[in-house]
Amino acid sequence: MASSVTPTPADSAPPLDTAAALLFIINASSGAQDIDAKRAVIESILGARGRRGELLVCQPAELARVAAQAAAKAVANHTAVVAVGGDGSLNAVAQAAHATGCPMGVIPYGTFNYFARTHGIPTDPAAAAQLLLDAQPLPVQVAAINDRVFLVNASLGIYPELLQDRETYKARFGRSRWVAFVAACATLLRAQHKLRLHIEMGGRARDVQTLTLFVGNNRLQLQQFGANPADTMAGTPGHGSMAALMLRPIGTMSMIGLMLHGAMGRLGEAAGVESFEFQHMVVRPRLLPGRHEVVVAFDGEVARMRAPIDFRVLEKPLYLLQDPHAAGAAAATAADEEAAP
């Protein structure tokens, strides 16, 4: 096959050689049968179009290393890395792709797939794989929590606890949005721990008490919550800024009311919820003597980070393989679906 480098609309976008093999990174944590199904989808689409691909299956502990090696190879060969999986897999591949500047593709296998849906990537794996072969690398906004890139959200407080509870419920009852909702309710009803935070933003500082600080880089997720803040600065979450939500400490009955607002997509109307937009925010949690780390979550992963916690929109974009004609329309359609009763 003759080499053909696809032109890209932005001068700074990386070149993409359609004759080079795409590098698919598959997390092996889902089990052999699921991996075989993913392989079959990818190989079928590639074979039908006469395209080349290299499938890299790895264990969760190897994901960051394999993604970094694949990204370096992608830069050298003018090709792209493709994340096959849920939020955690996408995040690991995005770390490597953003660091090297190579294009990144997505074949989503998550529960909510906010990142894919926002950027016009089909949630059907075969359709997503098909799109990759005609896509162009287009810049999308990414954010950082300390030194880690995130695509959808990052948080501290009760939200990391919610993610851990959700994994426990999923292991017992299966993967679905209903299971995720029940897990969230269970976490919220036993919420007790209050965070005391010193927040510095835009030359101003204040002290707050909150159950959680949630930072969103994805308009679709915020719209589903019903908590997309009114424009307070240039850009909107995902296009120049991020949104922060803070949940003030409240009683049990108020918490039940909060959950009902969230279930109806009206979280922004609930008492005790504050939202605002920003580009850079430094958070200094009040920690016990001798402690320097706090539990955080980003794109579904839970980790410990050293305080202070720095949230910021990154100037350097991630170059995501997208259909330039369908991306905006698909994101608008997804938002309309979430808003529908």
Image: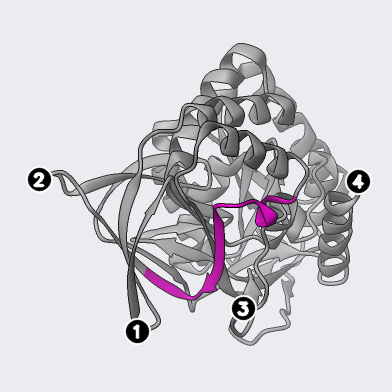
Amino acid tagged 3? Ala
Numbered mark located on residue 289 in the image = 2
The residue identified by callout 3 is 13
The circle on residue 203 is 1
Q: Nearer the viewer, residue 13 or 302?
A: 302
Q: Identify the amino acid type marked 1.
A: Gly
Q: CA distance from mark 1 to mark 4?
A: 41 Å
Q: Secondary structure at mark 4?
A: loop
Left or right of 198, for residue 300: right
Q: Which label sits in the foreground, 3 or 4?
A: 4
Using the numbered discs, state the Cα–Cα distance from disc 3 to disc 4 in whole angstroms.
39 Å
The residue indicated by pointer 4 is 341
Q: How is colour applied across the structure in the image?
A: one colour
Q: Secondary structure at mark 2?
A: loop
Of residues 89 and 201, the one drawn nearer to the viewer in this rendering = 201
Q: CA distance from mark 1 to mark 3?
A: 33 Å
- Quarter of the picture holding the N terminus: bottom right
Q: Are marks 3 and 2 in contact (CB under 8 Å)?
A: no
